[in-house]
Amino acid sequence: MRTLKVVTFTLVVVGALNWGLVGLARFDLVAAIFGLEFGETSGVTAAVYLLVGASALFQAATFTSTQGHSHTVPAASR
């Protein structure tokens, strides 16, 4: 589960940075990596965007379940 959380978090960060570049400089990094112009899509870029979106949903769904949980052992259990 930890690996899935790290991978999805990384994809969410990549997606956020890509949207920041789109807003700041009208530059789509994902499209550029695959040799496309701004606004163009292909099957591969669509898959990347889909994975980023699915990762965001996963992170949002698991966010509240991890809040307030400490990795330390409570004093009563020691």
Image: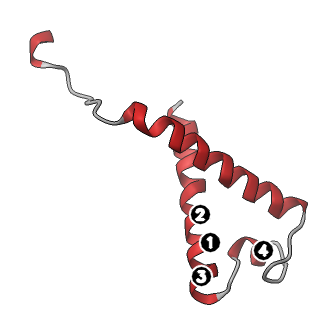
- As measured in the structure, the alpha-carbon distance from the residue carrying label 4 to the one carrying label 3 is 15 Å
Viewer-side residue, 1 vs 19: 19
The structure's colour scheme is secondary structure
For marks 2 and 3 on the same chain, the one whose residue lies earlier in the sequence: 2
Residue matched to label 3? 23
> Hey, what amino acid is under mark 3?
Gly
> Are dots 3 and 1 in contact, CB under 8 Å?
no
> Hey, what amino acid is under mark 1?
Asn
- As measured in the structure, the alpha-carbon distance from the residue carrying label 4 to the one carrying label 1 is 10 Å
The quarter of the picture where the C terminus appears is: top left
- Density class for disc 4 (Cα within 10 Å; few <14, some 14-19, many ≥20) is many
Marks 4, 3: nearer the viewer: 3
Disc number placed over residue 14 in the picture, else none: 2
Disc number placed over residue 18 in the picture, else none: 1
Disc number placed over residue 31 in the picture, else none: 4
Quarter of the view holding residue 45: bottom right
- As measured in the structure, the alpha-carbon distance from the residue carrying label 2 to the one carrying label 3 is 14 Å
> Hey, what amino acid is under mark 2?
Val
